[in-house]
Amino acid sequence: MWDQLLDRLRSRDPRGSGACSPCPSPAEMALHKQEQAVSEAKGPKAEEDGEAAEAGGLQGAGPGFQPPEGGFGWIVVFAATWCNGSIFGIQNSFGILYVMLQSDLGGGEKDPTLEFKTALVGALAMGMIFFCSPIVSIFTDRIGCRTTAASGAAIAFIGLLSSSFTKSLEVRYFTYGILFGCGSSFAFQPSLVILGHYFKHRLGLANGIVAGGSCLFSMSLPFFLKTIGSTIGLAHTFQVLSAFMFIQILLSLTFRPILPPSCDSHHNRQDKLASRNMKQQCGSQMRKYFNMRVFRRQTYRIWAFGIATAVLGYFVPYVHLIKYVEEEFKEKEKEWILLVCLGATSGLGRLVSGRIGDCIPGLKKIFLQVASFMLLGLMCMMIPQCQAFEGVIVVCLFLGLCDGFFITIMAPIAFELVGPMQASQAIGYLLGLMAIPMTAGPPIAGYLHDYFGNYYLAFYLAGVPPIIGGLVLSVVPLIHQRMLKKQQMDSGKDKMLVSEIVMNGELLPGCPATEAHV
């Protein structure tokens, strides 16, 4: 309200805001006091906004900078495609590795909790990718895309290579689950950030190439793993997969940032930090990198809770579907086709949902996520109902389509909920929240298989969280619409109050006339 009042006063001042007077008038004195009051009322929030703007200046380009829109940028696109494809191709093909891990442990007395323990290996790796996302954002800002991505690829390489030298599941929890998972997270996020350094008008095309190329990995890796796994064994398969990460180390060196920093913002930030004591500087940096203001928005909290609930059953088919068709249909030659179908329709879903999302205004695009989660839940429940292997293939086609819609529309919804300045943090926190349920889902399904001797109940229950999450998400646009109407009503009241105050200058707080009456 006071911001509007000050703007109105400036517009009514005939001399303009830039005029100078040797002797300020009472109106100018009142205006100066108003500005002081407003700045004091804003307090830490204005300070945080300033710091966020400065951080954006450091990340943004200078006044005359234009991205090259190609050239060396296409090599960066290829590197980002290799990164996304190799990481998520391996993760989404874990169903093949899952069967190989259990075969590698065969020969002794069967462990009644073997399904649970084996599923935890892949679930840890996928969960760590999301769990580390907020931390990776900080490292990317502090040390740059190239160093962060290369370090992450090196850690992932060490994790996969060391997994080939052991047969212990407990050791592979650390080597594959923790090292490969964390390294994948540190390599993955910078590959998306760096594209904005080389493209602006063609950024959508660059992202589309990366998304489409990564799906080619998801389609081809299951067949590749099935072929080499039966030929060279699990240990050598891990070594071959580590070669993908070694190549990624070299490709990450192409992630050279070219956005020039804003010198004025840098000097202003240094001057501001120099004028504070150590405690204030630490607090300022903590607020900058661990800003929790996005959680003050009710719509974001509900959205994040709904997605975190839905992904409890999201990763279950990727882990257990191969083993299920082997047990149910005795199919051990063509089961890799299921993962190929998942990857193919996921790529199609990403391309189609991007175009559809652009045509849907505002937060209404969240209904795409609602529909994808509801359908995903129903398809999980349909798996035990399939009477033939071909029926499972049809289910997988729909599961991949839902996956593509859910992933692609996530960032645009975050922009709608919290705005562009906080969208990066909103996505980072959301991915962190997704880590725990996504990690817990496959082991729980494995435990249910160990207890009941089949996957029926596991797949039925895996479909429940996506349906609940979809129902929760469906209320977000309604709450957002109600909040907008309330804000418009409050804004109308503020305008009426401002007009009354401007008409009667004696009502201005701090006005000499008001003080005289008092």
Image (spheres, rainbow, N blue to C red):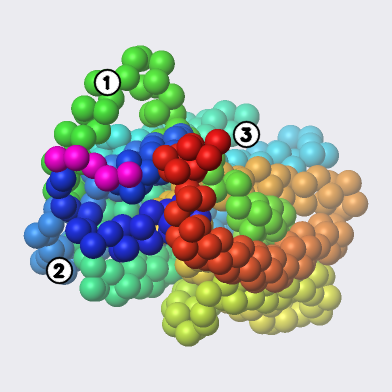
The answer to whether residue 103 is left or right of residue 217 is right
Mark 1–mark 3 distance (CA, rounded to whole Å): 54 Å
Identify the element where label 2 is drawn: loop
The residue that mark 1 highlights is 275
The residue that mark 3 highlights is 169
Q: Is residue 24 magenta?
A: yes
The residue that mark 2 highlights is 70
Q: Quadrant of residue 502?
A: bottom left
Where's residue 44, x and y in %?
A: 46, 34
Q: Is residue 382 visible to us here?
A: yes
The answer to whether residue 517 is left or right of residue 245 is right
- Res 459 label: none
Please tell me which of labels 3 and 2 falls first in the chain: 2
Residue furthest out toward the front: 517
Label 1 close to label 2 by CB (< 8 Å):
no
What amino acid is found at the position of numbered circle 3 in the picture? Leu
Closer to the camera in the image, 195 or 414: 414
1 or 2: mark nearer the eye? 1
Please tell me which of labels 1 and 2 falls first in the chain: 2
Q: Quadrant of residue 108?
A: top right
| Region rendered in magenta | 22-26
Closer to the camera in the image, 24 or 383: 24
Closer to the camera in the image, 508 or 164: 508
Q: How many marks?
A: 3
Q: Quadrant of residue 9?
A: bottom left
What amino acid is found at the position of numbered circle 2 in the picture? Gly
Closer to the camera in the image, 61 or 465: 61
Main secondary structure along the magenta-highlighted residues: loop
Q: Quadrant of the C terminus?
A: top right
